[in-house]
Amino acid sequence: MRVLIVGGSGFLGNELVRQSAAEGHVVAATCLTRPGTAAGVDWLRLDVRDRAAVVDLIGAFSPDVVVNAAFRQSDWVTTAVGAAHVAIATAGKGGRRGGCTGDARCAGVREIAATRISRPPAAGTTPSRQTSEEFGLMR
């Protein structure tokens, strides 16, 4: 499976990259300034605030799955608008996407199943809660 981890050089993204590569997936991961350290990964520079760049990168890599772990606490545009850019670009290419939320970052997660895929939120739940449940962070 071709997996794209957006924000792959961050704390959570790095673990997702590591586990995806260990499972034998073809992995590309993005970084804003410095690539991560995982071997066997195609490290790509990306500013998620640039919608055209996000669309181009997702189109060029053609992932089966996109997981967005990009996060910058002090930058709403990166965290929220960037996430929208990733979701829109993924949907436009017919891909599947998973989301990593603040819930995951705050839970002290050590093991995350990188191959979990997000689905539309069930009635009465939020995307954040649903994603947390999929990754085993909430019960």
Image: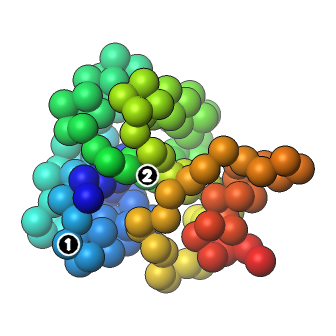
Label 1 residue SS: loop
Residue 23: percent from left, percent from top: 26, 76
The residue drawn where x is 30% and y is 54% is 3
Would you place residue 10 above or below residue 73 in this image?
Answer: below
Would you place residue 123 above or below residue 58 in this image?
Answer: below
Which residue corresponds to mark 1?
Answer: 24
* Residue at the far top in the pictured view: 52
Residues packed near mark 1 inside 10 Å, few (<14), some (14 to 19) or many (20 plus): few
Residue 8: percent from left, percent from top: 33, 55
First in sequence, mark 2 or 1: give its number: 1
The residue drawn where x is 47% and y is 81% is 111
Residue closer to the observer: 115 or 19: 115
Residue closer to the observer: 20 or 8: 20
Query: Picture quarter containing residue 81?
Result: top right
Label 2 residue SS: strand
Residue 12: percent from left, percent from top: 45, 65
* Residue at the far right in the pictured view: 124
Q: Is residue 126 left or right of residue 124?
A: left
Residues packed near mark 2 inside 10 Å, few (<14), some (14 to 19) or many (20 plus): many
Q: Does the rendering let one see residue 21? A: yes
Amino acid type of the residue that numbered disc 1 sits on in the rendered structure: Gly
* Residue at the far bottom in the pictured view: 110
Which residue corresponds to mark 2?
Answer: 67
Residue closer to the observer: 101 or 95: 95
Looking at the rendered image, the disc whose residue lies closer to the viewer, 2 or 1, is: 1
The residue drawn where x is 62% and y is 67% is 134
Q: Which mark is residue 120?
A: none
Whether residues under marks 2 and 1 lie with C-beta atoms below 8 angstroms apart, the answer is no
